[in-house]
Image (tube, rainbow, N blue to C red):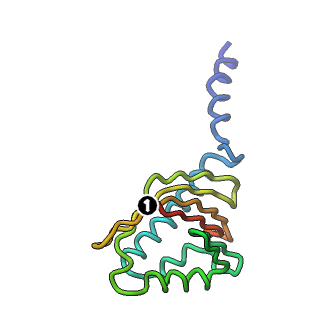
């Protein structure tokens, strides 16, 4: 009778070692933490006034897609240039914060993030929502598609 009882305790544990994407719980957790780390680093860089550091969260490739409003930017350089044009003057960057982050790890090399953004500046406080597609390239997670909307 002891052997069947052991199975009752072991089987639930084994079932819990697989995440929703077929990854182990540890792999799923590492992927989610890495993606959240990229976003935390972007917040830090933005709030330090470092657009080029902020851009490290994006895949440095012509394949990057950035959608905002009715504009689609293709490529890392075009996205970077757009950020510099809109926020490159002193005082335009303000303080950025992300909230309501929901990270869905889809596979060992793909994740989708939804969340909210808020930019606090003396003259205004624009805000909105975003959906990001992350890909793991080697050991690094990078944004390959950013769809950002504004509530204003």
In what element is the residue under mark 1?
Answer: strand
Toward the viewer: 134 or 64?
64
**The C terminus, quarter of image:** bottom left
The quadrant in which residue 98 appears is: bottom left
Residue 146, percent from left and from top: 60, 67
For the question of whether residue 49 can be seen, the reply is: yes
Tell how many labels.
1
**Image vertical order of residue 61 relative to residue 31, above or below:** below
Query: At 46% from the left edge and 52% from the top edge, which residue is drawn?
Result: 100
Residue 51 percent coordinates (x, y): 46, 81
| Residue 142 seen in the figure | no
Say which quarter of the image contains residue 61: bottom right
In this view, the residue farthest toward the left is: 122
The answer to whether residue 91 is left or right of residue 17 is left
Residue at image x 68%, y 70%? 137
On screen, 31 above or below 6? Answer: below
**Residue topped by disc 1:** 98
**Image quarter of the N terminus:** top right
Residue under the image location 64 percent in, 57 percent down: 111
Foreground: 104 or 14?
104
Residue 19 location (% of width, % of height):
65, 44
């Amino acid at each position: 009778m002891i052997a069947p009882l052991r199975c009752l305790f072991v089987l639930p544990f084994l079932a819990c070692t697989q995440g929703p994407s077929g990854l182990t719980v540890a792999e799923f957790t590492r992927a989610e933490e890495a993606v959240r780390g990229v976003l935390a680093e972007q917040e830090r860089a933005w709030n330090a006034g470092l657009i080029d550091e902020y851009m490290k969260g994006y895949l440095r490739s012509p394949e990057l897609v950035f959608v905002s409003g009715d504009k689609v930017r293709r490529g890392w350089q075009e996205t970077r240039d757009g950020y510099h044009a809109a926020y490159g003057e002193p005082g335009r960057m303000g303080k950025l914060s992300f909230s309501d982050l929901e990270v869905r790890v889809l596979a060992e090399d793909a994740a989708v993030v939804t969340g909210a953004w808020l930019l606090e500046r003396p003259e205004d406080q624009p805000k909105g929502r975003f959906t990001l597609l992350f890909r793991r390239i080697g050991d690094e997670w990078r944004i390959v598609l950013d769809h950002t909307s504004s509530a204003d």
